[in-house]
Image (tube, grey):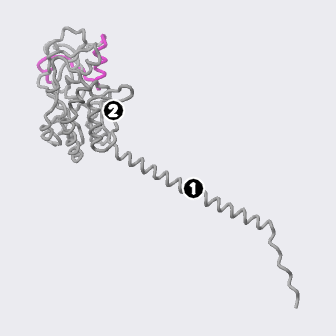
C-alpha cells in the first residue's frame, strides 16, 4: 500500500487575506451600527422639533410700534397687548410666536391660517364678523380722537378739521368713521398702510397733513412717547366707540371658546396691573371707562353674526 503524502500547510498569504476580509466585515458592521444610531438620533430630533412647532401659536401684532400696546425695548416686546398675548398663550400651554402684520392684512392672515390669533388693537365689528372673523372680547374700550403736533393751536374742535388733511390707517375702523365725518365736515382724507407713515407725514412740514385720527388710547400712547405730539383734549369723532377683541378665523370656534375663558380670567385678575404698567392717562381720562365688564365678554365673544 502506497504511503500517503502528508497534508500541506495553508499558505500564510491565504490566512492573511482571510484576516483582512474579516476585519473589513467587522469594520462595516461597526460603521453600520453607528450610522443607524445617528439616524435614530436625527429622527428623534426632527420629531421633537415638529412637536415643539405644533405646540406654538402664531399671534399677529402691529407691524409698527404702538407705545403702550406693543413695542420693542431692549430687544424685548412689551405692552398691554403683549402681556395679554403671553397670558393667553400660557393658558393654552403653547409658545407664542409674534408675527408683525399690517392693519389691512389681518382678515386674510387669519383666514389663510398664517396666524392663529390677532391681538393688535383689533376692533370688534359686524363687518369683520360678516367677512369670516370671530372675536373673543372685548378686552378694552375706547373712542376715537385726533392727534396733532404739540405746537398746533388751530385745531381744538371737530369743526376745525374743515379743509384740513387728516391721515388715517387704511382698512381701520377709524378710516370708516373718518369717511362718515367727511359727509358733515368736509376735509381731505389721506389713507396710509401704516400708522407710522401717518406719523411721518404729520411731523414733516413739507406735507399738508395736520392731524391723524385713530383710537384715543392709541394716540395717547404715541403722545406719551413723543413730546412733540399731543391728543386734542375733549375731541371725539362722533359715533365712535371701539371694543378691542382677539381675532380668529370663523373656523376656529373651539379655540375661540378656550380663548374667551382665558380672557375673562385676564380681565378679572390681570387687567388692572397690566394697564397701569403700560399706560399713563391725561386729559381727564380714567381707566375705569376703558375696562370692559367681564359679563359682557360672553355676549360679544365667538358670535358669527
Quadrant in which the C terminus is drawn: top left
Q: How far across and down, in percent of the image, does residue 144 sit? A: 17, 23
Q: Quadrant of residue 272?
A: top left
Q: How far across and down, in percent of the image, does residue 70 sit? A: 30, 28
* Residue 134 drawn in magenta: no
Q: Of the two numbered discs 1 and 2 on the same chain, state the one appearing first in sequence.
A: 1
Quadrant in which the N terminus is drawn: bottom right
For the residue carrying disc 2, how many other residues have a C-alpha within 10 Å: few (<14), some (14-19), or many (20+)?
some
Q: Nearer the viewer, residue 183 or 229?
A: 229
SS for tag 2?
A: strand
* Residue 183 drawn in magenta: yes
Q: Residue at 20%, 45% (x, y): give it.
A: 257
Q: Is residue 20 above or below residue 231?
A: below
Gap between marks 1 and 2 measured at Cα: 44 Å
- Please give the range of residues in magenta: 180-206
Q: How far across and down, in percent of the image, does residue 270 sit? A: 22, 34
Q: Which residue position is annotated with label 2?
A: 100
Q: Nearer the viewer, residue 180 or 44?
A: 44
Q: Quadrant of residue 249?
A: top left
Q: Residue at 22%, 17% (x, y): give it.
A: 147
Horizontally, residue 9 falls left or right of residue 199, namely: right
Q: Which residue position is annotated with label 1?
A: 34
- Between marks 1 and 2 in the image, the one whose residue lies nearer the viewer: 1
Q: Quadrant of residue 145?
A: top left
SS for tag 1?
A: helix
Q: How far across and down, in percent of the image, does residue 93 sit? A: 30, 44
Q: Is residue 180 above or below residue 17?
A: above
Amino acid at each position: 500500500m502506497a504511503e500517503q503524502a502528508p497534508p500541506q500547510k495553508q499558505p500564510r498569504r491565504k490566512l492573511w487575506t482571510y484576516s483582512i476580509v474579516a476585519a473589513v466585515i467587522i469594520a462595516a458592521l461597526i460603521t453600520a451600527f453607528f450610522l443607524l444610531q445617528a439616524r435614530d438620533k436625527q429622527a428623534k430630533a426632527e420629531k421633537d422639533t415638529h412637536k415643539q412647532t405644533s405646540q406654538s401659536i402664531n399671534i399677529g401684532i402691529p407691524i409698527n410700534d404702538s407705545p403702550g400696546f406693543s413695542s420693542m425695548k431692549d430687544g424685548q416686546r412689551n405692552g398691554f397687548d403683549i402681556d395679554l398675548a403671553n397670558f393667553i398663550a400660557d393658558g393654552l400651554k403653547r409658545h407664542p410666536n409674534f408675527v408683525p402684520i399690517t392693519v389691512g392684512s389681518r382678515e386674510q392672515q387669519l383666514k389663510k391660517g398664517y396666524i392663529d390669533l390677532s391681538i393688535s388693537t383689533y376692533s370688534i365689528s359686524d363687518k369683520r364678523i360678516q367677512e369670516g372673523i370671530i372675536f373673543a372680547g372685548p378686552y378694552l374700550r375706547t373712542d376715537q380722537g385726533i392727534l396733532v403736533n404739540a405746537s398746533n393751536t388751530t385745531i381744538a374742535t371737530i369743526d376745525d378739521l374743515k379743509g384740513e388733511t387728516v391721515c388715517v390707517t387704511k382698512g381701520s375702523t377709524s378710516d370708516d368713521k373718518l369717511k362718515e365725518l367727511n359727509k358733515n365736515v368736509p376735509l381731505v382724507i389721506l389713507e396710509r398702510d401704516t400708522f407710522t407713515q401717518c406719523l411721518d407725514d404729520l411731523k414733516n412740514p413739507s406735507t399738508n397733513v395736520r392731524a391723524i385720527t385713530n383710537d384715543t388710547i392709541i394716540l395717547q400712547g404715541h403722545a406719551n412717547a413723543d413730546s412733540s405730539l399731543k391728543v386734542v383734549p375733549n375731541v371725539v369723532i362722533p359715533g365712535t366707540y371701539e371694543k378691542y377683541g382677539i381675532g380668529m378665523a370663523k373656523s376656529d370656534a373651539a379655540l375661540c371658546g378656550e380663548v374667551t375663558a382665558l380672557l375673562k380670567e385676564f380681565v378679572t385678575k390681570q387687567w388692572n396691573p397690566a394697564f397701569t404698567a403700560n399706560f399713563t392717562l391725561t386729559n381727564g381720562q380714567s381707566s375705569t371707562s376703558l375696562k370692559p365688564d367681564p359679563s359682557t365678554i360672553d355676549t360679544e365673544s365667538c358670535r358669527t353674526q
